[in-house]
Amino acid sequence: MVRRWMPYSMFAHATSLAGPAEGPASRAHLHILSSPQGYDARVRAVAIALLGAAAGCASSGADFGSRAVAARVAAFAAATPHPTHLWRDTPPYSSPGEGLVVAYVEIPAGSRNKYEYRIRDNARVLDRVIRSEVGGYPINYGMIPGTIAFDGDPLDVLVLGPSLKGGALIRGVVVGLMDMDDEKGGDPKVVVSPLGPDGGPRFALTAALRAEVGRWFNGYKRFETAAGKWSRVTGWGSVEDAHRLIVRCRTFFEAGR
């Protein structure tokens, strides 16, 4: 049954119109997540039907260049030795029709330890420690498995609420999109909230939180400019913008285009 709270509630109805998925379960997924074969094709069809050609924010309108193409080839090669693999085997949506996104927490809110999920190791590794002048991440930071973004890495995700354990895998309700550029190009980040008692978003993406998070990401590379690094938050997108971006990044993950 479609829950009334869902900002993406039409998703479930449109999925039913798209017809049944074909075939049995396609693969085993980690953390008791599963997806029927053909589900991603249905997601794309539904997203196109619901969202059409609505204008998105700048980064979500970017395209996948040679860097992303090369990174995709390298990522799948790096994941090959692992019989089960978090990034490769976990779909971005937890189940058909719900519109709930799977988020892997790399960095807990408040931490200055910049962990990154390394595809080769199928695990988090410490990349560096953020300077004390910058301060810890103002929000839980991670990635959406089963995706490749414009920079060739898994699509970034920001998870609202108190600090979560690093390495946690959660289901979240999409509440928006932070549009951002850096020295590599478009670097947008989907924003999700953990589920509340009613199954809806537990936390809201308020104007005050947008301002706080935006300020931090605008300045967190300010001590790395000599190395050519920079970042700029260019705006905030809607729930629909975020879902469309997830579908694009999933399509590139699967097809390389």
Image (cartoon, rainbow, N blue to C red):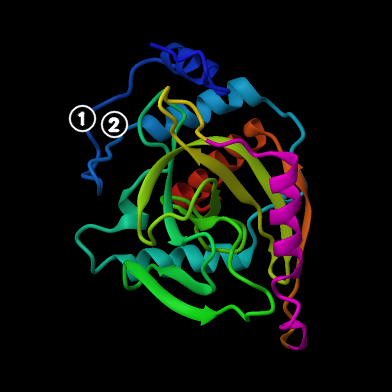
Asked whether, in this view, residue 187 is left or right of residue 69, the answer is: right
Count numbered badges in the picture: 2
Whether residue 60 is visible: no
Are the residues flagged by discs 1 and 2 in contact, CB closer than 8 Å? yes
Of the image marks 1 and 2, the number of the one nearer the N terminus: 1
Helix, strand or loop status at disc 2:
loop
Residue 207: in magenta span: yes
Estimate how packed mark 2 is, as few (under 14), some (14 to 19) or many (20 or more) residues with alpha carbons within 10 Å.
some
Whether residue 254 is visible: yes
Which stretch is magenta? 203-226
**In the rendered image of this protein, does residue 152 appear above or below residue 148?**
below
Q: Give 15 or 122, whichever is nearer the viewer.
A: 122
**In the rendered image of this protein, does residue 192 appear above or below residue 138?**
above
Asked whether, in this view, residue 127 is left or right of residue 215, the answer is: left
Q: Where does residue 20 sit, x and y in percent of width and height?
A: 34, 17
Helix, strand or loop status at disc 1:
loop
Residue linked to disc 2: 36
Q: Main secondary structure of the magenta part?
A: helix
The kind of residue tagged 2 is Pro
Q: Give 10 or 157, whichever is nearer the viewer.
A: 157
Q: Give 232 or 48, whichever is nearer the viewer.
A: 232
Asked whether, in this view, residue 226 is left or right of residue 108, the answer is: right
The residue at the far bottom in this view is 226
The kind of residue tagged 1 is Pro
- Residue at the location (59% across, 46% down)? 190
**In the rendered image of this protein, does residue 84 appear above or below residue 177?**
below
- Residue at the location (42% across, 54% down)? 164
Asked whether, in this view, residue 232 is left or right of residue 147, the answer is: right
- Residue at the location (69% across, 34% down)? 238
- Residue at the location (71% across, 63% down)? 216
Residue 244 figure quarter: top right
Residue linked to disc 1: 24
